[in-house]
Image: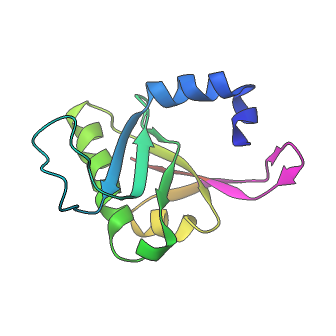
Amino acid sequence: MWASRTGSAAGWNIRRMAAHTWVAALADDACDGDSPDSAIGTPIGFIDVDDSGYIDMLFVAPAYGRLGVATLLLARVEQFTADHGIVRLAVHASITAHPFFARHGFRMVETRHPTIGTVSFTNYLMTRP
């Protein structure tokens, strides 16, 4: 469980609650969109950003990859950060996500090789002014 990065599932939850999150969802015939209790449809992706401009998570379901979902989600973050005076975005991008962020103007600052538990991987600190 990746929550170990924060020490506990409770710590992970606190981080999640402090983030601003957007969900991309399919339109659903049962969803009227007018009431807070109505379903939003099937989630296919999400993104979050904190008040410093750090994007902690971006995910799109594989069946919806390369259809512009991640670009639309990033656009929501860009609008939010612009509206709130946040001038710099940062992300620790995975090997898979690196090309996406590079196409959207992020520049690599550092290559990292973190280990969480017994799992080691490569990611890239990327920023965009």
* 98 on left or right of 7: left
Position of 105 relative to 50 (above/below): below
Q: Is residue 65 visible?
A: no
Q: Residue at x 26, y 47 (%)?
A: 39
**Residue 64 horizontal/vertical position (percent):** 41, 73
Q: Above or below — where is 15 with respect to 124?
A: above
Residue 49 percent location from the top left of the image: 42, 39
Of residues 99 and 31, the one nearer the viewer is: 31
Q: How many discs mark residues in the rendered view?
A: 0
Which x, y percent locates residue 35?
13, 37
User: Compared to 119, does 116 lie above or below?
Assistant: above
Where on the picture, by quarter, is residue 83? Answer: top left
Residue 15 falls left or right of residue 41: right
Q: Which residues are magenta?
A: 109-124
Query: Is 8 placed left or right of 125 in the picture?
Result: right
Q: Residue at x 28, y 63 (%)?
A: 26
Question: Can residue 30 be spotted in the picture?
Answer: yes
Q: Overall secondary structure of the magenta stretch?
A: strand
Q: Is residue 62 left or right of residue 6?
A: left
Residue ID at (46%, 75%)? 63
Is residue 73 part of the magenta span, yes or no? no
